[in-house]
Amino acid sequence: LKATDQIDNRSIDKAISFYAQVLNVEKYFSRKIKIPSTVTETQIEDLEYISELICGGICESSWDTLSCNFIIDKVIKETFLNYWDNEYEIQFVTTVTVNLWENTFSLPIRRRYVCAHIDNPKKLKAKIDVLDIGDPAKVTFVPGSCGNKVEDCLMSN
């Protein structure tokens, strides 16, 4: 390095952040990661996502549609018949799996759709009205009036 060379601070910051995230993942999973000589943008995004989760952060993204399968019970039937035009917050627990540099990392997360509205609510109401308790029903949600934000966070052990 010569005195006349310019150092790109953003590149240095990105490199430090990258290696800090790798260390977070290695510590959490008690596993060493071998980083290849070429790293894709998708791999960097996956690393940022998993590192943010294990550090207790909330990862936000956007969504277009969400389809859910229900078995009709009394509460579900009443909800969809009487509150079919409402907006809902939908939460569920799932496992995300990230494949990164010949490693597979799985984490239990809580996924939260902040503002969901039933797609074609009048059609769903008519369908639910004729279904019996115990029948299956597929419900499709779209973003509601307050946006299309979805949040993931790590489930605590």
Image (cartoon, grey):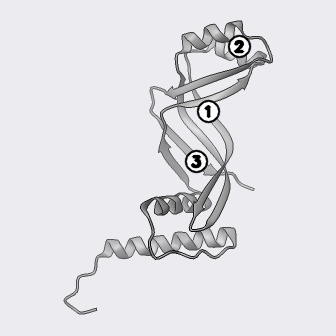
What amino acid is labelled 3 in the image? Asp
Residue most extreme to the left: 4
Relative to 84, is 9 on the left or the right? left
For disc 3, the neighbor class at 10 Å (few under 14, some 14 to 19, many from 20) is many
Residue bearing the label numbered 3: 152
Relative to 27, is 145 on the left or the right? left
State yes or no: discs 3 and 1 in contact (Cβ < 8 Å).
no
Considering only vertical position in the picture, is 143 above or below 130?
A: below
**Alpha carbon distance from label 3 to label 1:** 12 Å
What amino acid is labelled 1 in the image? Ile
Residue bearing the label numbered 1: 90
Q: Residue at x 39, y 73 (%)?
A: 13
Residue bearing the label numbered 2: 78
Residue 99 locus on image (x, y percent): 59, 60
Classify the position of the C terminus by image quarter. bottom right
Residue 89 locus on image (x, y percent): 59, 31
Residue 84 locus on image (x, y percent): 59, 15
Relative to 12, is 53 on the left or the right? right
**Alpha carbon distance from label 3 to label 2:** 29 Å
Q: Nearer the viewer, residue 19 or 82?
A: 19
Residue most extreme to the right: 134
First along the sequence among labels 3 and 1 = 1
Q: Residue at x 67, y 73 (%)?
A: 31
Relative to 72, is 109 on the left or the right? left
